[in-house]
Image (spheres, grey):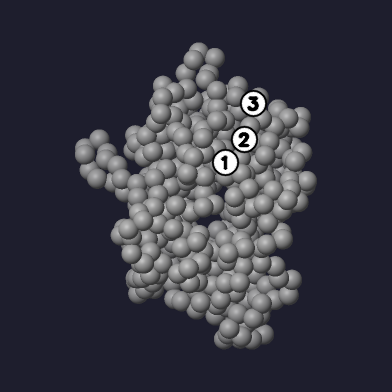
């Protein structure tokens, strides 16, 4: 994924000094990772390459990740569409306790099975139906249980009235959906963060985006304006979670502390890496490339002039998402892209039905007339709204 903000992002070409250990980081699809395992190994043995150790640990942790990605990349290069995509992004809620200025939740619209304004919290039975369908197939790999909202805020009930939360979704994705890699991304300022240690979660991303309260509040202001000290609350909860993980000796979930690489954080990125890399329970720190979200937020996140630098490179590129990733919204509706905040990328089926999990299967949507037409449009160089002004056509499979 290329930087959409090359003029204002933090850049480095040589290894950084991370508390006496030289680390350049390991490039991934959407940014650079700095391994706590590699850092500690190089502290113990200065002859070791911290980045190489980190790369090896990550490969050992997720041995199927690289071959699955390579297969998806080959399919995309040949414009081959799998029966069901190997990756799913499932938005369990479009409600959040943060009002991040770079997030398109501010303009969110969701629709129900009839095409009317839909709920912002996914029904358990809709989720279970999707997992049941995937569980009957082979070849799928990863599911992200988050979208525009804060996923740990999700609550539901099963057929017996038993109360459910994010941990139950994770375990259902494993046992019913048979996903190999399950991940959750959170702002972490929630009372049930510990539940992610009580389920079969593979990867946890904790997004903080600042080392000081002023920068944090600039990037992640609370949706509740009366909340006192959200930065302090977040830090306290994250440290408590990491202490519990370390104390119990749990290897899972692989825990990543994330900072987005943007103008407001550029001067704090190195300090962020240095701070979190030495905390027990942290597996790596991730410097994530920024998403411009131009179709929904205009040039409020990245200036039009700066964003145009990347657009010149991707303007003729068919989006990777529509060839590799299934997206379902909190209302249960299928859309072509998980970034589609206004739920514009869909059409009714020929018989008038809305592409919703209550009405059709994931396979019917993925192989249906709208997705087939949209892919053909992208291949021919025609991009409808919101695709035409979107810069994020390359995060899903990365540059290759």
- Residue behind mark 2: 386
Q: Secondary structure at mark 2?
A: loop
Query: Which residue is at a point 45% across and 69% down the rendered structure image?
Result: 213
Q: Secondary structure at mark 3?
A: helix
* Left or right placement of residue 302 versus residue 84 in this view: right
* Left or right placement of residue 60 versus residue 247 in this view: right
- Between 80 and 156, the one lying in front of the other is 156
Q: Counting other residues with Cα less than 10 Å from the Cα at mark 1, is it few (<14), some (14-19), or many (20 or more)?
A: many
Given contact means CB atoms under 8 Å apart, are the residues at marks 3 and 1 in contact? Answer: no
Q: Secondary structure at mark 1?
A: helix
- Residue behind mark 3: 372
Please identify, in this view, whether the residue under mark 2 or under mark 3 is nearer the observer.
2
Determine which of the numbered discs, if any, sits on residue 296 in the image. 1
Of callouts 2 and 1, which one flags the residue occurring earlier in the amino acid sequence?
Answer: 1
Given contact means CB atoms under 8 Å apart, are the residues at marks 2 and 1 in contact? Answer: yes
Q: Counting other residues with Cα less than 10 Å from the Cα at mark 2, is it few (<14), some (14-19), or many (20 or more)?
A: some
Residue 167 vs 351, above or below: the answer is below
Query: Which residue is at a point 47% across and 18% down the rendered structure image?
Result: 353
Residue 198 placement (x, y as % from top left):
33, 59
* Left or right placement of residue 172 versus residue 391 in this view: left
Of callouts 2 and 3, which one flags the residue occurring earlier in the amino acid sequence?
Answer: 3
């Amino acid at each position: 994924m290329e930087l959409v903000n090359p003029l204002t992002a933090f850049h480095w070409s040589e290894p950084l000094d991370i508390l006496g250990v030289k680390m350049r980081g390991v490039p991934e699809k959407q940014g650079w990772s700095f391994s706590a395992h590699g850092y500690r190994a190089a502290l113990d043995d200065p002859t070791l390459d911290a980045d190489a150790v980190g790369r090896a640990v990550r490969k050992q942790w997720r041995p199927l990740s690289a071959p699955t990605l390579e297969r998806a990349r080959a399919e995309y290069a040949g414009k081959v569409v799998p029966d069901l995509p190997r990756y799913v992004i499932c938005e369990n809620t479009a409600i959040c306790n943060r009002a991040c200025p770079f997030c398109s939740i501010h303009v969110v619209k969701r629709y129900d099975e009839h095409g009317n304004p839909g709920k912002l919290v996914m029904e358990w039975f809709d989720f279970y139906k999707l997992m049941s369908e995937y569980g009957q197939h082979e070849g799928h790999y990863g599911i992200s249980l988050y979208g525009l909202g804060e996923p740990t805020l999700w609550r539901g009930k099963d057929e017996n009235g038993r109360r459910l939360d994010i941990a139950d979704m994770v375990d259902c994705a494993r046992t019913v959906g048979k996903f190999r890699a399950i991940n959750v991304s959170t702002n972490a300022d929630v009372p049930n963060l510990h539940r992610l240690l009580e389920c079969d979660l593979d990867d946890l991303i904790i997004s903080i985006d600042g080392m000081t309260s002023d920068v944090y509040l600039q990037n992640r202001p609370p949706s509740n304006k009366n909340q006192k000290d959200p930065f302090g609350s977040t830090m306290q909860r994250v440290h408590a979670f990491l202490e519990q993980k370390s104390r119990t000796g749990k290897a899972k979930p692989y825990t990543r502390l994330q900072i987005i690489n943007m103008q407001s954080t550029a001067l704090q990125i190195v300090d962020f890496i240095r701070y979190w890399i030495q905390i027990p329970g942290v597996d790596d720190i991730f410097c994530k490339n920024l998403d411009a979200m131009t179709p929904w937020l205009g040039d409020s996140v990245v200036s039009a002039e700066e964003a145009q630098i990347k657009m010149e490179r991707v303007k003729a590129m068919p989006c990777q998402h529509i060839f590799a990733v299934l997206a379902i919204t909190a209302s249960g509706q299928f859309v072509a892209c998980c970034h589609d905040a206004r739920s514009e990328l869909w059409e009714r089926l020929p018989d008038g039905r809305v592409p919703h999990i209550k009405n059709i299967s994931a396979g019917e949507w993925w192989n249906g007339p709208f997705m087939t037409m949209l892919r053909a449009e992208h291949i021919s160089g025609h991009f409808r709204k919101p695709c035409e002004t979107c810069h994020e056509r390359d995060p899903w499979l990365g540059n290759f």
